Every structure is written in structure tokens, then in C-alpha cells.
Amino acid sequence: MQEQWRWFSVASEVAAIIQEQAFDDLDAPVERVSGAEVPAPYARNLEVAAFPSEQQIADAVRRVLYRPVGGV
């Protein structure tokens, strides 16, 4: 999880290296959860909308574990 943009960040580079170097060892593709492609907001309500939520992170974890998204 990162608050930066999906592209051109440290996390995207790490994800690319993992995908390239450990592809055969992965059980699922690398999943990136990142902030919206907008300038960093200052207002709290815009921060909530722009940055990843706990639900988005949990959904990504469920996808890579092949569990139903939205389920318990």
C-alpha cells in the first residue's frame, strides 16, 4: 500500500522487480493499492477520497488469496 500515485513510485518499481525476479514463485500477480492520480489534497475529506482505504487494502488481499471480495 502506498499513498503515492500508482505510476513512477518506489512501490511500483519494487512490484516490477518482484514480478520480474520471482514470477515463478508467485501464487498470484502482484497487486498494487495506491492513491488516486490527483495532486495531494490538504482538506481532510479529499484526503479520505484520494488515499487508499482499509477496505481497498482488504479487497486486494482477498483477490491475491483467491477469496471472494466483499466476503468475510
Image: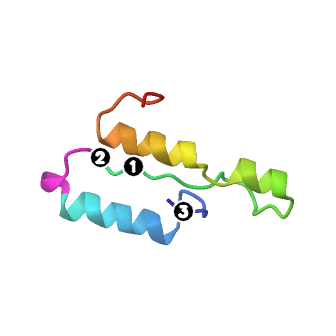
**In the image, residue 45 lies in the stretch drawn in magenta:** no
Name above or below for residue 9 compared with residue 68.
Answer: below
What residue do we see at 25% from left, 44% from top? 28
Rounded to the nearest angstrom, the CA distance separating label 2 from label 3 is 17 Å
Query: Is mark 2 in CB contact (under 8 Å) with mark 1?
Result: yes
Please state which of residues 69 and 38 is positioned toward the viewer in this rendering: 69
Q: Is residue 38 left or right of residue 16?
A: right
Rounded to the nearest angstrom, the CA distance separating label 3 from label 1 is 12 Å
Q: Is residue 12 left or right of residue 7?
A: left
- Asked which secondary structure carries label 1, the reply is loop
Please state which of residues 71 and 42 is positioned toward the viewer in this rendering: 71
Whichever of callouts 3 and 1 sits on the residue coming sooner in the sequence is 3
Q: Which residues are magenta?
A: 23-29
Amino acid residing under circle 2: Pro
Name above or below for residue 16 compared with residue 68.
Answer: below
Name above or below for residue 28 compared with residue 15.
Answer: above
What residue do we see at 73% from left, 55% from top? 38
Amino acid residing under circle 3: Gln
How busy is the neighbourhood of tag 1: few (under 14 within 10 Å), some, or many (20 plus)?
some
Whichever of callouts 2 and 3 sits on the residue coming sooner in the sequence is 3
- x, y percentage for residue 17? 30, 66
Q: Which residue is mark 2?
A: 29
Residue 63 bears which disc, if any?
Answer: none
Amino acid residing under circle 1: Glu
- x, y percentage for residue 64? 32, 42
Q: Residue most toward the front?
A: 72
- Asked which secondary structure carries label 2, the reply is loop
Residue 2 bears which disc, if any?
Answer: 3
Q: Which residue is mark 1?
A: 31
